[in-house]
Every structure is written in C-alpha cells, then in structure tokens.
Image (tube, rainbow, N blue to C red):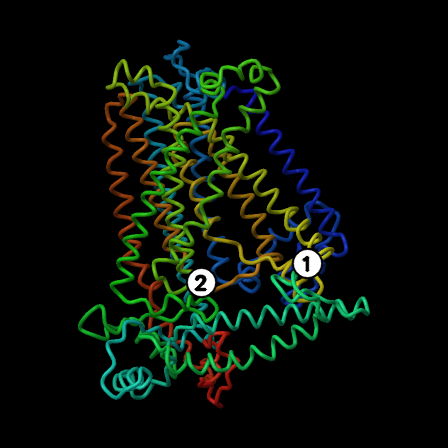
Amino acid sequence: MDLSSFITSLTTSFLIFVLLMLLFTWLSGKPGNEFVYYPNRILKGLDPIEGGYASRNPFAWAREALSSTENDIISMSGIDTAVYFVFLSTVLGILALSGVLLLPVLLPLAATDKSRKTSNQATSNGAFSNLDKLSMGNVGEKTDRLWAFFAGTYWVSFMAYYFLWKAYKHVSQLRARALESPEVKPEQFAVLVRDAPALPVGQTRKEQIDSYFRSIYPETFCRSMVITNNKKVNEIYEELKGYKKKLARAEAVYAVEGTRPTNGSGLLGLLGKRVDSIDYYTGKIDRIIPRLTAAQKATLRENQQAAALVFFTNRMAAASAAQNLHARFLDKWTVTDAPEPRQLIWSNLDIRFFERQVRQIAVYVVVALTILFYMVPIAFISAFTTLANLKKLLPFLKEVVDQPTIKTILEAYLPQMALIVFLALLPELLLFLSRSEGIPSQSHVERAASGKYFYFSVLNVFIGVTVGGTLFSTLEEIEKDPNSIINLLARSLPRNATYFLTFVALKFFVGYGLELSRVVPLVIFHLKTKYMCKTQEEVKESWFPGDMGYATKAPTDMLILTIVLCYSIIAPLIIPFGVVYFALGWLVLRNQALKVYVPSYESYGRMWPHLHSRVVASLVLFQLTMLGYFGAKKFAYTLIVIPAIIFSLVFALVCHRKFYRFFQDTALEVAARGQNEPAPNMGQIFRCYLPPSLTHEKVDKDGQP
C-alpha cells in the first residue's frame, strides 16, 4: 500500500466516525429514539435525558463517560462490565507508556539510518515509501542501532508485567467486594451436583441426594432440586407462550381497530378456514394448559437425572462444599459452585463426566480443523486482495484497477473489509461448539468461545495474513531458493505494517462509529414498531439491546493488542493507532454500558484470568517475533531476547498460582464476611432456580414442586 492509499484510508475512516458521531448526537435527542439509545436507563427506571444526555453538543456523551466512576459502571452494568473496563485501561496503559519512550527514540533511529539505500529493500508491498523509513525494516543488519530496538523489547515487556500485576490485584478486590456484599444472591447458597451414582434399591433420586448431603452437612444442608429432562415440557411451554403472544396481539388489534381479527386455521395461520383469532387462540390455550400440567407432573416424577442443585442455609457451607472432594473417584459426586439461575444451561447439567471429556476432546479437534480450514481462505484473501496479486490472477482487471481513484480506494479498504467480513461468520459457530462441550453456564460458554476465537484470530489473521501473503507473493523466489523462506518471512513483517495500520484504523473509527450511532438497531426498531409490533411486549422485544457480547468483543480486542504488540518495535508508528483504538473503545463502550447494554449474567469477574493469560500469550508471541526478527537482522546478541520469554512464562505462572484459585472458587474468608445479613428466605432462593416451564405447576409454601 502506498502513502496516498494509507492517508485516504485513515482520512475517510476518521470522517466516517465524525459523521456517525454527529448522527448519534442528532438522533439520540429525537423523541421516540430513547428506547434505542438509553434502554439500560429506562429499564432501571431512570430518566433517559437527565443531566443533558440529549444535548445537541456532540461531545456531551463523551463528557459523561469520562466523568463516570467504576461504581457507576457496577451499578448500571455489573462487575463483569467493570472488569472489562479494567482490561481496556490496562492495555491502554501498557501501550501509552510504551509509546512514550519508543516513539521519540525508535522513529528517528529508523528514519535516519542510511545503510539501506537500494530499492530492492522495499518493505511495503514493493514500494519503498516514507512510512517504511519509520520502521525497523529501514535499519541495516548488524548495526549498533539495533540495541535501541532490543531495549524497547524489554521496555514493552516490563510495562506489561507492571500493569497486569496491578490489574489482577484490583480485579480480585472487585470480586471480593461483590461476594462480601450482604445482598442475598441465590447462587451463593447453592452448589451444582453432577454424576450422582446409580440409585440404591428402594430410593428415589431425591432421597439419595438428600440423604448423602445431609449425612455430610447435617447442620447446614437445606434441600435439593433434582435436575429433570425438560425437553417435552419445554416444547409444550413454548407452544403455550406462542399462542399467548398471538392472543395478546389479536386483542391489541381489536382494541385499536374495533374489528375482531381473523386467521386461517391451517398452516402458519395462512391456510384453511378463516376463524376468529381471539376465540381460536383462547381455545388453543385452554387445551394446552391441561397438557402442560400433565407433562410437568410426569417430568417431575419420571424424568429425574443424576444431577441436582443442593441448597445450604449459609454462604460458608455452600462455598466450602463447592471446593471439596466428595468421593474417592473423580467421576462420582462432582460438586461445583452453582451458576446464577438466569445463566444455567439446563440441557447440559445431566451430561455424565466421561461424556463431557469426550465432547471436549471432540470439540477441540473440530476447532483445530476449523482453524486449518479457515487458514487457507484467509491466506488466500490476504494474498488475492493486494492489487499486485489481483492483477496477476485477473489480468483483465488491470485497466480498471490502474485508475488512480479506484486504485487508491481498493488499496485502502479491499483487504481489510474482506478480512472483517470473513471473521464475522465465526462467533456463532464457536458458541455452539463451546455449548456442545457440556458446559453448565452461559458465562462459561462465552469464556470458552472467547478463548477459541482468540487463538483462531491470532493463528489465522496475524500469522495467516503475514505468512500467506508472503508465500503467495514470493512463490517464484522460494522455488529458486527454498532456504530463503525464513528471511522472506522476516522481511514480510514490516511489509505488512501498513496493512495492519489500516486494519486497526478501520476497526476503531468505523467500528466504534457504528457502535455509538446504533444506526442499524435504530432502523430495525422503527421498521418493527411501524409494521410488525402490536403489543407492548413486542415493542420491548424490538428495542431490547441484550448484553455487550464479550465472546466477540474481547477476542477482537486481543487481536488488535497482539497486532500492536508484535509491531510495536518493528513499526512503532502502530502504537498511536493502538492507543486510539483502546482509548476510543473505552470511551464509546463506557457510554454504551451506562446507557445501552443490559447484562444477561453476572460471573463476578471470572473472565479476567482468561483475559490476563491471553495478554501474556500475546506478549510471548511479540517476544518470539522479535527473537526471529533480530535473528533475521543478524544481530549478534539476539539470544538475549530469550530471558524475556522466560520472564513472561514465569510471570504467568506466578499470577496463576497467586490469584487464579479465588476466581475458580469463593475464598472462605470472603464468604464468611457476608454472613452477618438476616437469614435468607430459602424458599425464595429455591424458586429462583425453578425452570420456567415448570413454574406453572403449583408449589408448596417452601417452593418445592
């Protein structure tokens, strides 16, 4: 990519962001749009425009986001969201402090090196541009200037250690403070029990579980809820919900139009004899309710599984039970802490121990194959979407793409947009695969999917784009001299610097511009309310925003961090782009957390250890990259980079040993500090865990179905 294309990409991306920000300022103040721009505040009973939130000042939203505190984030969106902002702040600190030293030192050293003058040392897609002169690719081999780049490698590493350690301590405090709160949280009084052994003769599953836990915890055991196979009752329940929604819709149409609506009695209400909708759906509901009641009784009696939720009278006992070994064999009486009621994946709770292990291995194999499968088209895209290769493969396009305007636009956007679209196809597949492992909670599924997405994006985007593009463009050179492949790959790193610069710029300007403006959700909301929604429930469904989507946001941030770290020494100019990406992300997403997104679960910061370990993984990849690149530069002291890699691995191990266990289990000292509240209503806690499809069944005064 030449300099004009780079500037075109950067300028147009910035102008798009400014346009979208102004659009947000205008649209968010329009009556009727508050449900799209302030749903979180509305659901909490707050005034959406209090304090000038609908001000015409285009920077009013930024001022409020900057003035908000961590406690504001926790009160509006929970601990998990606050922890995500700790991650953004940590990465921002690493990059900003690294850039303070690297930019004024490394850029002049690279720009003033005169040891490489020939045009065959080009570093940016074959064109030796002014941008290339600011990269390490402009520094000659074996020169003393390489010492500065070597010192920069250690500076970035120590900045990462400092900020990550500080952040781990802070997140631990946030988690402890939340778990020590006197507020009654049902999950703190329950444990999830799986892999119950075969039933003894003459005992029901509930009797077996109750007697087992009562014998171990005679003073604190309260009761149990046996997990049931709810597939059939769920189907009937969903059918009932569907007819109730249709009835409410028909009644709403009748109230507005004054005419009783009709529908077909056949397929999808379109075919068959026309009937009165209100009478038809009322009759359907009356016939389904007895079926649902019978199915509920049969499910509770006949479909009991070898799993249960066990409830204790205090937090201390539940926390202790969740981390104790209850049987001699690992595949019997597996006890873990209970997830929140709203994030339980009921269909996964009764999956047996060895089946879970087999599923996990099978999913890992599928993910590995998916990574390999995607690596081919992504490498092809990275090679195919460069103009030079495009003209080689499709020579008939040469006349078109050589037009100055078209060439500039294609070089500025084509490769990056192709890659972004390709990556957008992946998250749902990874969520499905993670759920198939038998994981019991939604937050755990998202953490698992996030990890898969991170390794996928690093292997396929960072490595795939670099290696694939290089191999494709230098195939003839490799055929002549196969031993030159290492040097070619090393030379490809600065060559891809401008590609990744524009990729990062596109992500933060256009991506966060669309995030802030919410143009797509706004259009969908108005189309649905105008043509489809008839009831208040349907209107709410049309604007309900859902959560922030950590399963995709966190891996995307990690990919950007990996790119910026790995190029921070080779092409230091990428550091300001990384700083702007995370600073703008912090600002825009803080606004969204305060006003828009509604958390779907709370795991009290359990995502943090995974974020931490992946930042360290990115750091190690950066150090390995520098080790290889210093070797390609024939730097005599290249091996001194190896201690930095060892430091990173030791740092990760120390952090894991010191902090991780508290994120896996609740520390007993933390559970004990929350014991001073009045005795909880155990019947109410029990009812929180009842599946919706079973709550229509009558319950006794204690909440037992």
Circle 2 SS class: helix
Q: Residue at x 43, y 73 (%)?
A: 230
**Depth check, front residue: 647 or 336:** 336
The structure residue drawn at horizontal position 43% and vertical position 28%, both measured from the top left corner, is 382
Q: Amino acid at mark 2?
A: Leu
Q: Position of residue 81 (x, y in %)?
A: 50, 57
User: For this view, does 549 lie left or right of residue 246?
Assistant: left
Report how far apart the C-alphas of labels 2 and 1 lie in the structure.
31 Å
Residue in the picture at 47% in, 49% down: 552
**Residue 387 versus residue 349 in the image, above or below:** above
Q: Is residue 572 above or below residue 119?
A: below
Quadrant the C terminus occupies: bottom left
Q: Nearer the viewer, mark 2 or mark 1?
A: 1
**Residue at image location 39% in from the left, 73% down from the top:** 229
Name the N-terminal-most of marks 2 and 1: 1
Residue 561: quarter of image: top left
Identify residue for label 1: 35
Question: What number of labels is visible?
Answer: 2
Question: Mark 1 belongs to which amino acid?
Answer: Phe
Residue 174 bears which disc, if any?
A: 2
Q: Residue 572 sits in which quadrant? A: top left
Disc 2 + disc 1, Cβ < 8 Å: no
- Regarding residue 32, the answer to whether it shows in the image is yes
Residue 651, horizontal then vertical, whole percent: 29, 48
